[in-house]
Image (spheres, rainbow, N blue to C red):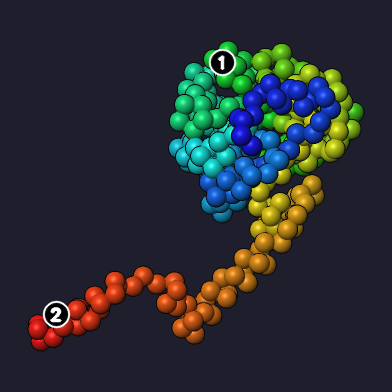
Amino acid sequence: MNTKITISDLLAEKRQNRRIVAVSCYDYTTAKLISQTSVQMVVVGDSAAQAMLGFDSTLPATMDFMVAITAAVRRGAPNVYLVADMPFLSYQVSKSEAVRNAGRFVVEAGAQMIKIEASGAYLDTIKAVSDADMAVMAHIGIRPQTISKIGRLKAEATTAEMALELIALAEQMIQAGASALLIEGTAAEVAEIITNRCELPVISCGSGPGCDGQILIAPDILGLTQGPGPKFTKSYSSLADDTIGAFNNYSKEIKSGIFPDKAHSYHMKAGEFEKLQELLKGKL
């Protein structure tokens, strides 16, 4: 991609009924590979706390950590539309702190949109960040940052009453100034209704095929994660097995003395080794 993707491009995709492809990515190396594909959007999610750091929830992700990895992804994928994820306690304390932290992502990391896990309690926060001239992606449906409060994450809007509440919430987010929605773990029928009622891009994370775009985390796409994941994930490779095999082959070659060989080593200039030997003799 030679031209940086903008929010205008994403809106055009929506209006022309073309699907938006998004990936959640956390590092420079993976981002650089993504930038060579047709993926249009990268979200640097606080799920990095789990995928990169090994925590059992997203809560330990800090602002400094998220800014650092978002900047790394920007360097790896300079032309892909970049969304930064506000971690736990980066926007809950006050609206002014939310705006300040959102601004860090824009100024320090080159983010083009700020994602906020949002209930009705954060409509004013969405508005404050939007009013500060930053595009906001309101994340509704399953919100992983609520795990300590609700204990277990489960599919959202699976009853008519819950569906009405989520549809109303989506409309409130848009009225508050959201520039896009991300709907996670929500009944597909409801996510499609929201998408059809909304003029803004709607990205599905496990919310069925009826949204404007889809997102999965890069480790799942690559098959790097082991064990069962959420129902909605799908692997398009099996790099975990390949990676284990590569490390085992590396270990075997070192133990057997095959690696490193002459071709993978630096050497002295011609005649210098003999000169060194003569110099060493004079010191004995």
- Percent from the top left, x then y, of residue 62? 49, 39
Residue neighbourhood size for the residue with mark 2, other residues' Cα within 10 Å, grouped as few (<14), some (14–19), many (≥20): few
Q: Please name the residue that numbered disc 1 is placed on.
A: 133
Instruction: Write down the residue under mark 2.
Output: 279
In the depicted view, which residue is nearer to us: 248 or 78? Answer: 78
Q: Residue at x 71, y 26 (%)?
A: 10
Q: Quadrant of residue 228?
A: bottom right
Among all residues in the image, which is located at the extreme front?
Answer: 270
Residue lying at 19% horizontally and 78% vertically, measured from the top left = 276
Horizontal side, residue 9 vs residue 16: left or right:
left
For the residue labelled by badge 2, is the local secondary structure a helix, a strand or a loop?
helix
Residue 205 or residue 14, whichever sits in front:
14
Query: Which of these two is toward me, 162 or 260?
Result: 260
Q: Quadrant of the C terminus?
A: bottom left
Q: Amino acid at mark 2?
A: Leu
The CA distance from mark 2 to mark 1 is 69 Å
Q: Position of residue 7 (x, y in %)?
A: 66, 23
Relative height, residue 57 to residue 6 (above, below): below
The image position of residue 11, as x and y in percent, is: 74, 22
Q: Quadrant of residue 216?
A: top right
